[in-house]
Image (cartoon, rainbow, N blue to C red):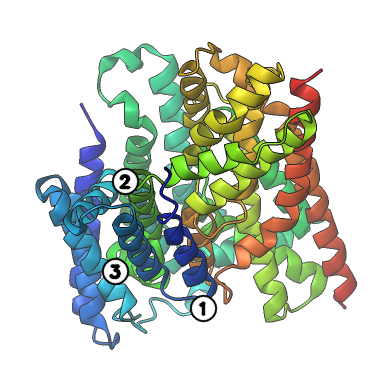
Amino acid sequence: MINYWPLLGIALVVIGFALRFNPLLVVAVAAIVTGLLGGMPFLKILGVLGKGFNDNRYVSVIWIVLPVVGVLERYGLQQRARTLIASMRGATTGRLLIAYLAFRQIFAALGLTSVAGHPQTVRPLVAPMALAAAEKEHGKLDEATAERVKAMSAATDNVGLFFGEDIFLAIASILLIQGALAGFGIQLTPFQLSVWAIPSAICAFLIHGTRLLLLDRSLKRRGR
Amino acid sequence: MITLHWLYVLAGAMFAAFAIGSARDATNPKRWGNGAFWGLLAVSFWFGDFLGDVGNGVLVLALVTIAGTHFLGRGSKQSTTILERERFSGRLGNRLFLPALVIPFTAFAGTLLFTYTPLKASGLIDPKSVTLVLLGAGVIIALVICYAWLRPPLTAPIEEGRRLMDSIGWAAVLPQMLAALGAVFAAAGVGTTIGAMAGAIIPSGSVFLAVLLYALGMVVFTMIMGNAFAAFPVMAAAIGIPILVHQDGGNPAVIGAVGMLSGFCGTLMTPMAANFNIVPAALLELKNQYGVIKAQVPTALPLLLANILILYFGAFR
């Protein structure tokens, strides 16, 4: 007999996020409720939660780049990024982000996933450049448009990373697929798997690239 | 050998400095909350391995309490004004990009060096954490360059880093918290339950419907768990292997690879993938914390359709 009650924890997460309670609080409550419904004693849940947190500290190590980004911003890095774009003829938000998408996909496909990312490149470089390019097309940006351009900069980084990295042979997800299939007696090489990441990578580039060109058009239409 | 622990020591030192800086920042009405929050993270990085599982659990609850009761604030100390920054930017020119590019370049050159040359066997860096260690090395090199070239005040990296860290706030630890939640979900048997449910509603006879259910299952489960890694083994066991490979004779390489990528479409659409979707919203100071997700959904849905077609036509030719 399967115990369906722990699924209530998932519902709690969905409701909590939708009502915009503090997400840390939502996650902690969901963890405790899920554990209790799954028949775990409270101290056991606390232990699993604590061990999970401790084992995943590497996720938060990325913040060590902030002091460097902060110092460079103090000396005008964002302003410099804007000036550079403003001086480039033909640089539009869409073209700039398409170039970044290609860069991100290619480097991720070579296994170089952490050469770029939200703290390292999007905040100090890509987003200010995209904004500057948008201002060139559009004139002064209203808040909603600026938000859209910034959000698209972050989205472009994610799409490029997700749909590039699996082309690399030794990436965690490929190794995970290989391991999981081996558990069922299906032996595949990483190469056999990563080849099949290429069609999706091309589709991702075409679909997201089209959206970026459309973004350019809507920026131009609404400008001046 | 340089392992992840060296990085934890570095990160712990940074958070400890953030904590001290926060506690002394009189412009932040909630300075003690910030001090305690970053201080606890420093404790986690430095002493996490000695606290025991329950001890770490208590630390997590303390972090959650500080964030959940709104004890986190922001100081109003401006570092340099926009006008000063314009002036610096004009004077320093494009060379200003160089320190910023040191970090990715170190990661790039270092990864090549430690993967494709005899250095790989030198044992200098733990092969399991080469990229992160190189990231840390890049940060240190960039900081040294900044000090030597720009001559900022001694505490500038801490103060500027803290300014950014405070603007991110609780979102900074959300990815780690969600990973911990994943551990609890797994221990409570959520994965097996979902797998059993997906396996139970599988239609027989239609290969396309089975492919559709497999891909959608990957998406939904990924959205719940926040990453496709947790979803893949469950969906592979429930539908991918028994139905698509064994019963319908599909190519397992396609089912594996494109199944995972279908899950990635789900990652683009869920707040549970906080480091990709929520943290950047905070980092870019978006008003809508779901702004990045909103920007990604129109890419994710057509891409999911593309993946379903690749699955169907690629695996069952």
Say what amino acid the circle numbered 2 marks: Asn
- State left or right for residue A67 relative to residue B46: right
Height in image: A214 above or below A74? above
Give yes or no for contact between labels 3 and 1 (Cβ–Cβ under 8 Å). no
Return the mark for residue A56.
2
Q: Secondary structure at mark 3?
A: helix
The mark closer to the camera, 3 or 1, is: 3
In the rendered structure, which amino acid carries the disc numbered 1?
Ile
Disc on res. B82: 1
Measured Cα–Cα span from mark 3 to mark 1:
35 Å
Whether label 2 touches label 1, CB < 8 Å: no
The chain letter under disc 2 is A
Rendered residue at 42%/76% (across/down): B80
Element at label 2? loop
Q: Where, by quadrant of the figure, is residue B133 drawn?
A: top left
Tell me which amino acid carries mark 3.
Val
Q: Residues within 10 Å of mark 2 (few under 14, many from 20)?
A: some
Name the residue tied to disc 3: B64
| Disc 3 with disc 1 on a shared chain | yes
